[in-house]
Image (cartoon, rainbow, N blue to C red):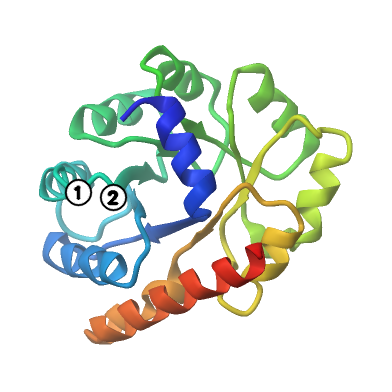
Amino acid sequence: MKKEQVLARMKEDCLVAVVRAKNLEQGEKVVDAIIAGGINFIEITMTMDQGNPVEFISKMSEKYRDNPAIVIGAGTVLDPETARAVILAGANYVVSPGLNVETIKLCNRYRVPMLPGVLTPTEAITALEYGCDVIKVFPGNLVGPAAISSFKGPLPQGDFMPSGGVDVDNVDKWIKAGAYAVGTGSSLTKGANTGDYAAVTAKAKEFVEAVAAARK
């Protein structure tokens, strides 16, 4: 999928599910449950207790290869070496908790969207200077929805996606504050901790409905 298509779809869907899998088997069940609930953007993190997260991305990319609605990406990417590995594995976008210029440059080289994590205007400006189309505000729970409008005041040309602390009860506030999209993880997938994947699907549906309501 081309970079422009990924970004346009992300804005349209406005919702990214962050999956921190314990292992490949559990991770696949979580991804399937989230997709069953209607969320199409899956961000698979590089943090996995057992197994290879790059292999997991490859497996999910292949599994959903014939479903054009599903967009698999990689999260917690800390360096360009990992970025290259996940891109080769099939990741359509790359997300990081921090800002690493070399990682941004690598992703730009291969025309893959790179969303670096920022928490200050200086970091946001650096991300823009190196060509990031969407910037991740992380950890979102430290700053709250008002951070989006605060960033966009001096940087109206920037697009921002909060992650960390986004849940069903506050997702409308983030969207109304001007978020390009939102990322959500633990509040969406906590049912998986007890093997209740139906709860993950139900929560995904709640998120989809909450986002749709907030955008009206």
Q: 161 left or right of 146?
A: left
Percent x, y of residue 15:
49, 57
User: How many marks do you count on the picture?
Assistant: 2
Q: Are discs 1 and 2 less than 8 Å apart at CB?
A: yes
- Residue, disc 1: 67
- Residue, disc 2: 70
Residue type at mark 1: give it: Asn
Q: Residues within 10 Å of mark 2 (few under 14, many from 20)?
A: some
Q: Quarter of the image holding residue 35?
A: bottom left
Is residue 137 visible from the viewing direction of this image?
no
Q: Residues within 10 Å of mark 1 (few under 14, many from 20)?
A: few
Q: Quadrant of the N terminus?
A: top left
Tag 1 secondary structure: loop
Residue at figure coordinates x 24%, y 65% from the top left: 22
In the displayed structure, 106 sits above or below 35; it is above
Percent x, y of residue 12:
51, 48
Percent x, y of residue 74:
35, 43
Q: Quadrant of the C terminus?
A: bottom right
Task: Say which of 118 and 178 sits in front.
Answer: 178
Residue at figure coordinates x 58%, y 26% from the top left: 132
Q: 31 left or right of 179?
A: left
- Mark drawn on residue 206: none
Q: Quarter of the image holding residue 73?
A: top left
Task: Say which of 88 and 6 sits in front.
Answer: 6
Residue at figure coordinates x 88%, y 34% from the top left: 154
In the displayed structure, 56 sits above or below 135; it is below
Percent x, y of residue 201:
31, 78
